[in-house]
Image (tube, grey):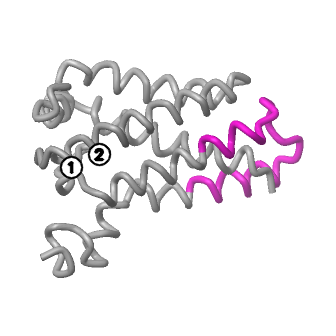
């Protein structure tokens, strides 16, 4: 199985769903921008979405190495923002994938750091080309898409496990 394509697929799916969830309607984008207001970053909403789209485009081209590096950079900015909100005890709603996510917390830092690891690993193994075998490509891409669901559904998994403010373990 092609590790590069698996890692690309994870990040492409995560960043594509994140961007689409914010761009699917004017109110979705407005809600996302508003969720950044407590951090004083509401004006950065267009740059966040543009960065997410850029990562997808780069990872789908021969510029995958740049895509991995941009993804890691964006994710580290997210980690920094989340850590700042936690340190200052500023409640910020997670609108990472649209909808009404829970309050940003340590679980989001963990999720984004895991995605940074994926981006750095991808940057270290990428060749910039796709595998020659169609079957190998399908297996790698399918595996990546399946694994991306863990990150996209991170808040729901935390809720089911009782690890967010709506769950019993967090009370």
Asked if the residues shown at circle 2 and circle 1 are in contact, with their CB atoms under 8 angstroms apart, the answer is yes
Q: Quick one: label 1, few (<14), some, or many (20+) residues within 10 Å?
A: some
Name of the residue lying farthest toward the bottom: 168
Q: Residue 79, percent across and down?
A: 37, 42
Circle 2 is placed at which residue position?
Answer: 83
156 sits to left or right of 67: left
> What secondary structure do most residues of the magenta stretch adopt?
helix
As displayed, is residue 60 above or below residue 11? Answer: above
Q: Is residue 57 above or below residue 119?
A: above
Mark 1: secondary structure: helix
State the CA–CA distance, disc 2 to disc 1: 5 Å
Picture quadrant of residue 159: bottom left
Q: Residue at x 54, y 39 (%)?
A: 12
Where does the N terminus fall, quadrant-wise? bottom right
Residue carrying label 1: 86
Q: Which segment is the magenta one?
A: 119-145
Secondary structure type for disc 2: helix
Does 128 appear in magenta?
yes
Residue at the image point whose x is 45% and y is 26% from the top: 53
Q: Position of residue 46 (x, y in %)?
A: 29, 19
């Amino acid at each position: 199985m092609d590790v590069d394509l698996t890692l690309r697929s994870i990040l492409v799916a995560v960043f594509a769903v994140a961007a689409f969830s914010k761009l699917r309607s004017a109110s979705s984008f407005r809600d996302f921008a508003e969720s950044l207001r407590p951090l004083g970053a509401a004006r950065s909403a267009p740059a966040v979405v543009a960065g997410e789209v850029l990562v997808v485009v780069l990872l789908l081209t021969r510029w995958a190495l740049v895509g991995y590096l941009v993804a890691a950079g964006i994710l580290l900015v997210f980690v920094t923002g989340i850590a700042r909100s936690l340190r200052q005890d500023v409640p910020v709603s997670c609108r990472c994938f649209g909808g009404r996510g829970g309050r940003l917390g340590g679980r989001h830092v963990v999720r984004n750091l895991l995605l940074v690891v994926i981006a750095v690993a991808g940057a270290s193994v990428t060749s910039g080309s796709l595998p020659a075998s169609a079957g190998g490509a399908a297996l790698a891409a399918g595996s990546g898409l399946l694994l991306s669901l863990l990150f996209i559904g991170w808040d729901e998994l935390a809720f089911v496990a009782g690890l967010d403010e709506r769950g019993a373990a967090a009370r």
